[in-house]
Image (spheres, rainbow, N blue to C red):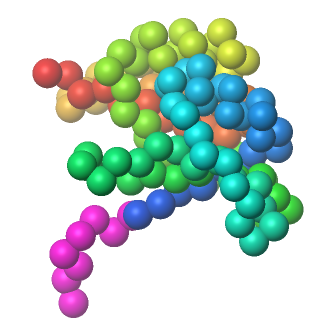
């Protein structure tokens, strides 16, 4: 049976220090977060608006959440990849893959404050 929607609906980024991770993502992307406890895990939800394409997720802290550079790679959209990478470095992150034109737009990868590998995407218009 063919799905009539996008198959990925949510993600969670493991963190060790929730306050540090919130500060990192808030500073790099200017996101606001909603904090809550779910099944004994500390969560901080990224913003989500029904009127826009895409999915949302949360920073997640708990025994089952272990930050890693291995595994699934999450891409965050940005209007200015160079400015985002500058803020990554200023806030303790590290560039893992420099800004590269992949023929569709610009992409880059960085290590966040918790040790996760995260990617950026900027569509070239």
Residue placed furthest toward the left: 125
Q: Look at 47% across and 43% down and name the residue there.
A: 47
Against 57, is 20 above or below?
A: above
Q: Look at 24% across and 28% down and name the residue there.
A: 123
Residue 109 can be seen in this image: no
Please identify the quadrant where the N terminus is shown: bottom left
Q: Look at 50% across and 25% down and name the residue there.
A: 29
Q: Look at 41% across and 48% down and name the residue there.
A: 48
Please identify the quadrant where the C terminus is shown: top left
From the viewer's perspective, tell me whether residue 45 is left or right of residue 5.
right
Where, by quadrant of the figure, is residue 122 drawn?
Answer: top left
Residue 24 can be seen in this image: yes
Against 13, is 108 above or below?
A: above
Against 4, is 84 above or below?
A: above
From the viewer's perspective, tell me whether residue 35 is left or right of residue 73.
right
> Residues in magenta?
1-8
Residue nearer the viewer, 31 or 86: 31
Q: Is 3 in the magenta?
A: yes
């Amino acid at each position: 049976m063919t799905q009539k929607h996008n198959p990925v609906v949510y993600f969670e980024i493991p963190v060790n220090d929730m306050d540090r991770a919130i500060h990192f993502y808030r500073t790099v992307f200017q996101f606001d977060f909603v904090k809550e406890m779910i099944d004994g895990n500390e969560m901080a939800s990224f913003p989500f608006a029904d009127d826009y394409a895409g999915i949302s997720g949360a920073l997640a802290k708990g025994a089952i959440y272990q930050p890693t550079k291995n595994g699934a790679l999450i891409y965050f959209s940005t209007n200015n990849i160079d400015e985002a990478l500058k803020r990554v470095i200023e806030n303790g992150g590290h560039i893992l893959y420099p800004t590269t034109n992949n023929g569709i737009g610009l992409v880059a990868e960085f290590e966040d404050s918790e040790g996760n590998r995260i990617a950026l995407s900027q569509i070239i218009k």
